[in-house]
């Protein structure tokens, strides 16, 4: 009888444990038309690390299903080939994703209010950024024509648009009911300029989202962690720190990683075909490349373009002979976020060990430092 009672107790414990797991489980089912068969990863986007939770090979009709479990709301990423992603904000929900592979940004999501809210946030930010890019082009045109009066008007409009975007992001972070969404939004902000807002935001986390580990981790990193968000130098991109990994496709679809260039001095050059200052700086970069390419030096161009054809034409026109990569997401580029890029051109020089030794080198400054380190 003792054995039988113990067995019943054991089975009951296992059943309760299984029920507990089911309670915290979430499932993501997808139907993406025109998608090539591939392995899809489900990744958890933590504050200090990204973890792979599940993986599955999609079917020929674009169907896939992934699952995991979580004790609290979290930010997750569906990671496809060609560095395509869908971000989701989930807690104990069965989520349905439908999309067309050729227009993945216009995905539809049901079953998760947090994910729907996050998608709406993306759409608004993308609209603001498109307006800013349009004004940038207008300003470049006014500069070339020497039309100072219209340039002044365009400059003011650019300032107004930037303020409008910042206020939208701050308002969303302050009002969303979903902690993962709020944390994602605030990390878009310039941590130096928006420090007063960020200080207040972090101080309010325990009240708005009590007892959530994600919020505690963010507050810890912000206030005392090695990767605090209070200044660009503290976001893992300070001189002497290890350069964040980059893994993006080239124009012909091959993926290049920054790690594959380890052992050389590498200039990570952020630019775009639509960026007039970048195009004006390119001859200096070309000259430096030609001078030092045979001395253990190379360049990795990271474009913030959205249009592949314009990107490729600019590469050819400016005679950029080094590796070029882009996820074609403009200012929403993952690499731009990882390197805290708020304006271009921008660059980082890293040593053979992958550590950053200089940044934002212009004109003769690039040649001078290369002369020094490549003796």
Image: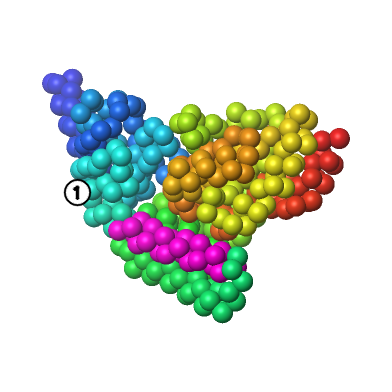
Q: Is residue 296 left or right of residue 6?
A: right
Q: How is the image coloured?
A: rainbow
Residue 170 in view of the camera: no
Residue 253 percent across, percent down from the top left: 45, 31
SS at circle 1: loop
Most common secondary structure along the magenta stretch: helix
User: For the image shown, how many numbered marks are present on the structure?
Assistant: 1
Q: Quadrant of the N terminus?
A: top left
- Neighbor class of circle 1 (other Cα within 10 Å; few <14, some 14-19, many 20+) is some
Residue 374 in view of the camera: yes
Q: Which residues are magenta?
A: 120-143
Residue at coordinates 36% horizontally, 66% vertically from top-left? 172
In front of the other: 151 or 341: 151
Residue at coordinates 59% horizontally, 57% vertically from top-left? 276
Report if residue 129 lies within the magenta region: yes
Report if residue 29 lies within the magenta region: no
Q: Quadrant of the C terminus?
A: top right
The image shows residue 136, relative to residue 48, as above or below, that is below
Residue 83 percent across, percent down from the top left: 42, 37
Residue 128 percent across, percent down from the top left: 40, 64
The image shows residue 70, relative to residue 259, as above or below, that is below
Residue at coordinates 47% horizontally, 51% vertically from top-left? 330
Q: Is residue 211 left or right of residue 327?
A: left
In front of the other: 270 or 47: 270
The image shows residue 66, relative to residue 155, as above or below, that is above
The image shows residue 85, relative to residue 296, as above or below, that is below
Tag 1 residue: 111
Residue 290 percent across, percent down from the top left: 74, 36
Residue at coordinates 59% horizontally, 68% vertically from top-left? 145
Residue that lies at the very extreme toward the front in this rendered image: 145
């Amino acid at each position: 009888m003792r054995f039988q009672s113990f067995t019943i107790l054991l089975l009951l414990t296992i059943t309760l444990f299984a029920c507990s797991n089911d309670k915290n489980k979430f499932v993501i089912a997808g139907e993406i038309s025109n998608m090539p068969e591939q392995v899809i990863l489900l990744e958890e986007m933590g504050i200090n690390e990204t973890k792979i939770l599940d993986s599955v090979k999609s079917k020929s009709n674009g169907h896939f299903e992934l699952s995991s479990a979580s004790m609290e709301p979290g930010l997750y990423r569906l990671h496809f080939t060609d560095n395509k992603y869908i971000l989701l904000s989930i807690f104990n929900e069965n989520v349905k994703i439908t999309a067309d592979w050729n227009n993945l940004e216009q995905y539809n999501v049901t079953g998760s209010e947090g994910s729907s809210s996050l998608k709406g946030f993306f759409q608004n930010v993308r609209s603001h950024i498109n307006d800013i890019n349009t004004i940038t082009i207008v300003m470049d045109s006014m500069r070339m024509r020497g039309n100072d009066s219209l340039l002044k008007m365009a400059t003011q409009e650019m300032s107004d648009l930037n303020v409008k975007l910042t206020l939208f992001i701050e308002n969303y972070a302050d009002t969303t009911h979903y902690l993962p969404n709020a944390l994602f939004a605030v990390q878009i902000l310039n941590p130096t300029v928006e420090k007063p807002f960020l200080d207040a935001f972090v101080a309010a986390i325990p009240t708005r989202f009590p007892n959530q580990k994600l919020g505690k981790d963010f507050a810890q990193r912000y206030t005392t962690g090695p990767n605090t968000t209070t200044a660009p130098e503290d976001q893992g991109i300070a001189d002497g720190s290890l350069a964040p990994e980059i893994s993006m496709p080239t124009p012909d679809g091959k993926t290049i990683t920054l790690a594959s260039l380890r052992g050389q001095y590498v200039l990570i050059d952020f630019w775009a075909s639509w960026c007039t200052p970048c195009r004006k700086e390119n001859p200096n970069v070309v000259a430096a490349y030609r001078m030092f390419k045979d001395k253990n030096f190379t360049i990795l161009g990271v474009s913030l373009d959205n249009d592949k054809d314009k990107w490729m034409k600019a590469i050819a026109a400016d005679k950029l002979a080094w590796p070029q990569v882009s996820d074609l997401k403009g200012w929403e580029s993952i690499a731009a976020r990882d390197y805290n890029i708020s304006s271009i051109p921008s660059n980082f020089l890293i040593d053979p060990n992958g550590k950053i030794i200089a940044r934002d080198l212009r004109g003769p400054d690039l040649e001078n430092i290369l002369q020094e380190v490549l003796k």
